[in-house]
Image (tube, rainbow, N blue to C red):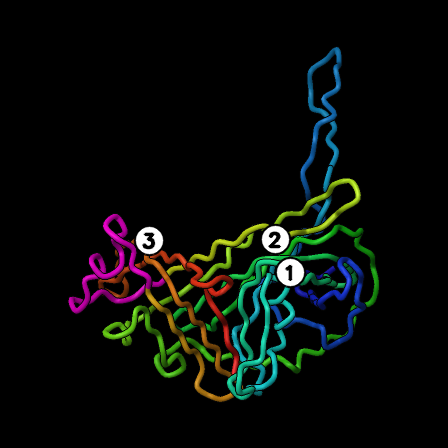
Amino acid sequence: MLYAQRNVFSKIESVYATDPTPVGTDAVLTSNLALTPYTGPTVSRNLNRSTIGGQQVINTNPYATVRFDVEVAGSGTATVVPAYSEILRACGMSVTAASPLGLGQIYAPLSSSFPSITHWTWIDGQKQVMNGARGNMSLALTRGDVPRYSFEFMGRYARPTYTAVLSANVSDYTAPVAVTNTNTPTFTLGGSPLTDLRVESFSLNMGNNVIPRNVINSEEVIITDRNVTGSVTFEATTSKNWFAGGVESHAGITALALNIVHGTVSGNIVKISAPAVQITNISESNSDGLFVYTCDLAFVPVSGNDEFTITTY
């Protein structure tokens, strides 16, 4: 079996843990695909014996995990959802068409009725079906690199089989653009005068608490909580006192609006917005001989399920 020959196909389930049957266009254009085909908590038999030594263990809740990255890009058409839309939804997100429709597709966190997804993973000829999966999403924009989503899913365990690989069709994925001054025209945190922050990197993590729960009459991967965090690294300047203007919370909390636009061509633009971001920590470092700050971020809801939105258009 060749390690490099690996594919994953993903499709939202209409009924939880019911295989929706993949087709070629359900293929995901991934990088860094990694599968844990069998894992779970174990208990020792803890038998009494006349000699010392290890004990047999029993897996009490077998499940599988899969991790992969997907490039951050649009669909090619402002009114069409991107090819990775269902993967975002299985991380506890809703999708709605913006009004008017030409303004794109808006993804936002959910607090209930989380969609589930089936992943079919092939490594060379070894196929594993992972039903009832839900997961977590993080994303990163780093200067001089392609922006990426990182996904990690848990799903029901099924014994791998050996079968021919389904023919993958990833033609609905759009090529991304790198994070540069030209390609990422907007980054504001708190509004003017912070419109022109010289940003090196930004990250966001949904922080979903994903639990594989196996009890009598129920076996399900569930999302029980969410804590959205992130970070930003930018050049330090004398024009802004970050300590008085956002970092210090002992004498009052400052909530900052975040707005990022990546991409300049209609159909391949991704916007990340958040209404109330708090800077929780700040540290300094050296980048190319320049003094830079790295700030930890907490994304707080205002009216609920609005810690952040991702809009593709």
Q: Is residue 215 visible?
A: yes
Percent across and percent down for residue 113 are 65, 60
Residue at the spot of label 3: 280
* Residue behind mark 2: 223
Residue sticking out furthest to the front: 303
**C-beta proximity under 8 Å, tags 1 and 2:** yes
Amino acid residing under circle 3: Thr
Residue position for label 1: 114
The answer, for residue 34, to whether it is visible in the render is: no
Give the residues drawn in magenta, as a range.
Answer: 232-255
Foreground disc of the pair 1, 3: 1
- Answer with the quarter of the image where residue 296 lies: bottom left
Callout 2: 10 Å neighbours few (<14), some, many (20+)?
A: many
| Rendering quarter of residue 257 | bottom left
Direction from residue 108 to residue 199 in the image, left or right: left
Residue that appears at 72% across and 41% down? 61
Alpha carbon separation for disc pair 1 and 3:
29 Å
Q: Is residue 250 magenta?
A: yes
Element at label 3:
strand
Question: How dense is the environment of label 1, judged by Cα within 10 Å: few (below 14), some, or many (20 and up)?
Answer: some
Residue 133 is drawn in which quadrant? bottom right
Among the two numbered marks 1 and 3 on one chain, the one whose residue lies closer to the N terminus: 1
Where is residue 167 drawn, in percent x and y? 77, 75
Residue 78, position as x, y percentages in the image: 55, 86
Q: Nearer the viewer, residue 308 or 134?
A: 308
